[in-house]
């Protein structure tokens, strides 16, 4: 087996890429067992620890699977897409539906767990949304809108919900900008959706989870109807 020795640089990354190339090219078919760490290390001109890290990276990409006492076997010749990549490829409406589920629960939790600092952050974000709306810049308006929703999720004090929202936001941003521009949502009302967002803030501040969730549900249903018209 000839893999060519690697040049000095991040060796783990080089080893991972070299092995990935051999797998995707079909050198080791699906179901086949890779050579042992010692053999791979010698072929690549690196230490066994480097090969071990490279194999771990390939396993994370869904290309190989180590089997206790048996070795490392090829699972696929194409890597599994990671979560951010799948979100970028998904339809905006699909991402929005899942985002709605996350935020509805977050709103209920926020109403119970919010602190004075959270309420202050929400009211500041609401003012930021209003200020951005007054500029006429649709991108700035969408960013300020997302920031308000992020503040509501943060008030739930659940790091998993916060992380999920942070993953959704980039996938939604351009789609929402397009929606605002294509449908002219702010042509007649530059402060589009202000009343609902103000109601959300006040519901969380008042500790009314039902009202917070209901307000968000109305907002999401309206947006999903608009997305369906695109």
Image (cartoon, grey):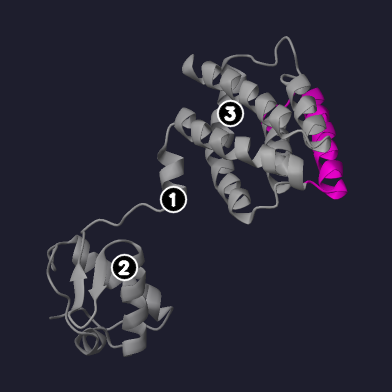
Could you tell which of marks 1 and 3 lies nearer the N-terminus?
A: 1
The residue lying at 63 percent from left, 14 percent from top is 184
Residue at the disc numbered 2: 59
Is residue 106 a member of the stretch shown in magenta?
A: no
10 on left or right of 68? right
The numbered dot on residue 83 is 1
Q: Is residue 230 visible?
A: no
In the figure, is residue 72 to the left or right of 158? left
The residue that disc 3 covers is 176
**Residue in the picture at 59% in, 25% down:** 220
Find residue 77 and report its horizontal and vertical position in percent: 21, 59
Q: In this view, does 46 lie above or below 124?
A: below
Residue 215 x/y as whole percent: 69, 25
Q: Residues within 10 Å of mark 2 (few under 14, many from 20)?
A: some
Lower sequence index among marks 1 and 2: 2
Can residue 22 be seen here? The reply is: yes
Mark closer to the observer (1, 3): 1
Farthest residue toward the top? 188
Q: Do the residues labelled 1 and 2 touch (CB within 8 Å)?
A: no
State the image quarter where residue 185 is shown.
Answer: top right
């Amino acid at each position: 087996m000839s893999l060519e020795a690697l040049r000095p640089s991040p060796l783990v990354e080089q080893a991972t890429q070299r092995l990935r190339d051999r797998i995707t090219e079909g050198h080791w078919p699906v179901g086949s067992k890779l050579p042992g760490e010692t053999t791979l290390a010698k072929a690549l001109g690196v230490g066994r620890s480097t090969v071990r890290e490279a194999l771990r990276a390939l396993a994370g990409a869904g290309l190989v699977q180590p089997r206790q006492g048996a070795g490392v076997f090829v699972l696929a010749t194409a890597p599994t897409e990671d979560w951010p990549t799948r979100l970028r490829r998904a339809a905006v409406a699909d991402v929005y539906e899942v985002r709605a589920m996350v935020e509805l629960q977050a709103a209920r939790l926020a109403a119970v767990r919010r602190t004075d600092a959270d309420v202050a952050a929400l009211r500041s974000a609401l003012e930021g949304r209003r200020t951005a709306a007054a500029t006429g810049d649709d991108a700035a308006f969408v960013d300020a809108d997302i920031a308000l929703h992020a503040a509501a999720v943060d008030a739930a004090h659940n790091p998993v919900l916060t992380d999920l929202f942070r993953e959704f936001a980039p996938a939604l941003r351009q789609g929402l900008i397009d929606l605002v521009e294509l449908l002219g949502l702010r042509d007649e009302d530059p402060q589009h959706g202000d009343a609902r967002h103000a109601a959300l803030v006040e519901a969380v501040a008042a500790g009314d989870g039902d009202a917070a969730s209901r307000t968000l549900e109305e907002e999401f249903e309206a947006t999903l109807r608009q997305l369906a018209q695109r």
